[in-house]
Image (spheres, grey):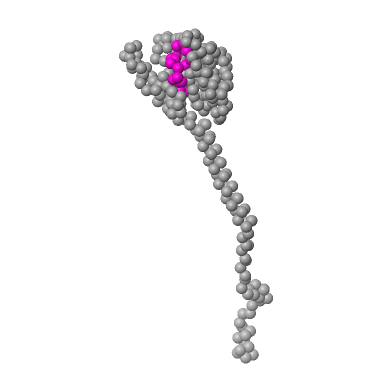
Amino acid sequence: MSTTERQFHDEPHPSDEDRERAPRGRRRRARKPRTTPGDVVRGFVRFFGEILLTAGLLMLFYAAYEVYGSQWETDREQQGLADGLDEAWAAAEERGPDSEPLPGSADSRLYVPDLDLDWVVVNGTEPDDIRYSPGRYTQYDSAPGELGNYGVAAHRTPGLFWDLDLLNEGDVMVLEDGENFYTYEVFREQTVLPEDFWVVTPDPFEEASEEEPGRALLTLTTCAPKLNNTHRLIVWAELTETTPKSEGMPDSIAHMAPDA
């Protein structure tokens, strides 16, 4: 065997399997599918749908916060108002009965034992007045315990008048000022339209006259139904008892005392 033949036999030769694996030419790249007008429309619809979904979730979270998340702000603001009102009452007591009216907008404290809630009531029912507190209607000159109608409005939110519809005839509410506790008993509940301002007149159930009202009323108003403002829920109560602060809190709210 010649040297050339020997080299030919010694050199490695590809097997049949290797030959099958060997590329037979350059592979062609897969063509991208051509974009059609339908693809563009579907892409736009998908994008727009995602935007709407995101916006809807954000609105849902915001609404939930407005209803439930703002309660801690109400509690915080109420605590500050309560501290200020107690200090003002104490200062007024030291100065005597002829002292100037209480500074600030706080007017009284309202207890609703059946809801286990109490609030500082401020003067005025404008949006800024009742953001975190019930507010007193100032159109009529009425004070806790006096003849006339002490009207109070609040938002229908947790922490305020959310459960006002749970009150029933015979339930009691208590107003507190610097000298006394005034117990009122619920005698009527009604849903009216927003323009029905007669509900907070000196005596809503008597014809208007020049005579002084014959009884002392407490009227609470809020939106109805919940999460809507198409109507107003009204709860009326009449004064049944006056308790001087020197005698302590009435039994109906004794469990709501700060140190109870």
Where in the figure is residue 216, as x and y percent of width and height? 48, 11
225, 207: nearer the viewer: 207
- Asked whether residue 252 is in view, the answer is no
Residue beneath the point at 64% across and 56% down: 38
Dividing the image into 4 quarters, which one contains the C terminus? Answer: top left
- Asked whether residue 236 is in view, the answer is yes
245, 121: nearer the viewer: 121
Dividing the image into 4 quarters, which one contains the N terminus? Answer: bottom right
Residue beneath the point at 55% across and 28% down: 229
Where in the figure is residue 19, as x and y percent of width and height? 66, 75
14 up-or-down from 251: above or below? below
Q: Is residue 30 left or right of residue 222?
A: right
- Give the residues in magenta: 134-150
Total marks shown come to: 0
Where in the figure is residue 125, as x and y percent of width and height? 46, 24
252 up-or-down from 133: above or below? above
Residue beneath the point at 60% across and 56% down: 40
106 up-or-down from 4: above or below? above
Residue beneath the point at 48% across and 29% down: 71
Where in the figure is residue 166, as x and y percent of width and height? 57, 21
74 up-or-down from 179: above or below? below
44, 214: nearer the viewer: 214
Q: Is residue 184 magenta?
A: no
Quarter of the image holding residue 249?
A: top left
Helix, strand or loop: magenta stretch? loop
Going by the picture, which residue comes out furthest to the bottom? 2
